[in-house]
Every structure is written in C-alpha cells, then in structure tokens.
Image (spheres, helix red, strand yellow):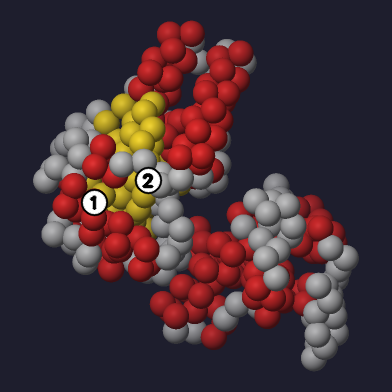
Amino acid sequence: MANISSIGVVGAGQMGSGIAQLAAVNGVDVWLYDTDSEALIKAQKSISNNIQRLLSKGHISQETSVDAVKRLRCSSRLEDLHSVDLVVEAIVESEQVKKSLFANLDKIVKSSAILASNTSSISITRLASATSRPGQVIGMHFMNPPPIMKLVEIIRGADTSEDTYCATKFLAERFGKTVICSQDYSGFIVNRILMPMINEAFHTLYTGVATKEDIDTGMKLGTNHPTGPLELADFIGLDVCLSIMKVLHVGLGDDKYAPCPLLVQYVDAGRLGKKRGVGVYDYPDAAVKTGGSPRL
C-alpha cells in the first residue's frame, strides 16, 4: 500500500481549503492549487486563522500548529503538484470540467499518484476514463465543512484497485474520519438519500403545504435532524443541490428525481444560498397552491 506523505488539493473554496487544513494539521504536506490567486490568499488566511483557533481551544499543540502552517503551500501552477502522492479535486460539480482536470493531472503527476475526486454525485468510472490510470482513480467525498464533519464517503470505480482503496481509506482515517464505502451509482449513499429529501422539501414549500419555517422545524423536532432541509440547502448551495438532482435524474432514469420547479427557479434567479447571501430564508414564502406560480 502506498504511503501518502504529500497531497495536492485542487480548488481553494470552502471544501478545498478545509481538506488542505485537515491534511496539514495531520502531518501531511499540501499543495493547494487554484487558478484564482485571490481565492488562494483568502484560503491561506482562513486556514491560518482556523489553526490558531484550534490552538487557542487546546485541540492541537503549539508544535502541531507551527508544523501545519509550514506544510501548506499555495500555487496557481498545476505543474507544482507533480510530485504529490495523491490529488483531491474539489472543484465545480461538472463532469466535463472534472474530466478535463483529470486528463491534465494524469500527464503531470507521477505514475504512482492517486487521483481522487470530492464529487458528491458524478460517476468515478467515467472520470477515470479520462486518464491512463483508472486503477488509481477513486472518489473521496468529504462532508461540508471537512474539518468538522466526521464522515468520508469513498467510492470505487469499476477499475479502482484494492491498493488505491486501502491507501485512500488509510489517509481518511489518519484525518480522524469514519469511512463508508459506496458502489459507483449516481449520488452514492449520502446524496442518494439526502438530495431527494431536500427536493421534496422544496415541493412541500412550492405546493403550499407549509411555510419554510414549519417544514424545517418539523424535520428538526419530528425526526431529530440537527438542521432542516431548506436551511441545509441554503448552506450547501442551491446550485449544488440542483446539479446533484440532475445527475440523479439522468443517472438513475427515474422521474422521482426530477428537480422541483421552485429549486430550478431559485437557481435561475441567482439565489444560491449562504455563499451568495440570498437563499430560501432571505425572501417571503414562495409557497403556492398546486398549479400556481411561485412567488420569488
């Protein structure tokens, strides 16, 4: 089994920076890559602040905090990832964009390197087809935010090798995560169940069954969910939820996964949730009677 001492993380957004922080704090050298230099500066500052917060709360030692900061390097040159043992991509949830990235990484990284995707729904087998190393391609789906959430969902493609799986699982466990393994079907485990629930919450709002507050309160107090589905959608990003529903709809071929029209309309209007400051909870109820038009 490969010993992973260095990783590359592609994408300096919330997911990528969180994964980079996890690696650095747990003694792994990290290259954090993004084409946007401003995003890298913001991510580096956020990671440094988070490490200081962990130190101030006694969760890590002074030695660990100093070491973690030293282990993190940022770059806008993909070629700087050439010597890492594993790359985790955490970019936009688009199969075409991810395949293009994997094809480029395949030419840059060393022959033994593992290519992992943080995709929450896209086929690992299809992503692997863009490379010359399908046995070394795997899904490594972190939950958001990565430093806090305890789960990592690992997905094996049709050709993912046992060594690749074991090395990736070992790395996730080194990060202090609990690992679950899914077969390579659209949505995997978590989003196969979660996203239809969020979609149904939008239908419940769309058809006037209840207000957004009552829908979320019902799920929190009636089923012991820590966060209501509409509030959670705002946190995840409505565009991400819509993208995953589309993958489920096409990949599983069942109309029960068709995105709710209200979810589609919110995304079309640019109301994507917390990352844009405008989401489900920033407007009056869109609830309408069946057959009407949603009020945005």
In the rendered structure, the answer to whether residue 267 lies left or right of residue 288 reads left
Name the secondary structure under disc 2: strand
Query: Toward the viewer: 136 or 37?
Result: 37
In the rendered structure, the answer to whether residue 283 lies left or right of residue 77 reads right
Query: Toward the viewer: 21 or 45?
Result: 45
User: Of marks 1 and 2, which one's residue comes earlier in the chain?
Assistant: 2
Within 10 Å of disc 1 (Cα), the crowding (few <14, some 14-19, many 20+) is some
Q: Residue at x 88, y 65 (%)?
A: 284
Q: Is residue 49 above or below residue 101?
A: above
Q: Residue at x 38, y 18 (%)?
A: 70
Q: Position of residue 189 (x, y in %)?
A: 46, 60
Q: Decide if residue 54 is in sight here.
A: no
Tally the numbered discs: 2
Which label is found at residue 122?
none
Quarter where residue 223 is shown? bottom right
Within 10 Å of disc 2 (Cα), the crowding (few <14, some 14-19, many 20+) is many
Tag 1 and tag 2, C-beta contact below 8 Å: yes
Q: Residue at x 13, y 59 (%)?
A: 132
| Distance CA(mark 1)–CA(mark 2) | 10 Å
Q: Position of residue 63 (x, y in %)?
A: 43, 8
Name the secondary structure under disc 1: helix
Q: Position of residue 201 (x, y in %)?
A: 71, 69
Which label is found at residue 105?
1
Quarter where residue 268 is shown? bottom right
Q: Decide if residue 264 is in sight here.
A: yes
Image quarter hosting the N terminus = top left
Query: Toward the viewer: 267 or 191?
Result: 267
Q: Is residue 177 above or below residue 57?
A: below
Q: Position of residue 214 (x, y in %)?
A: 85, 62
Residue under label 2, please give it. Answer: 10
Q: Amino acid at mark 1?
A: Leu
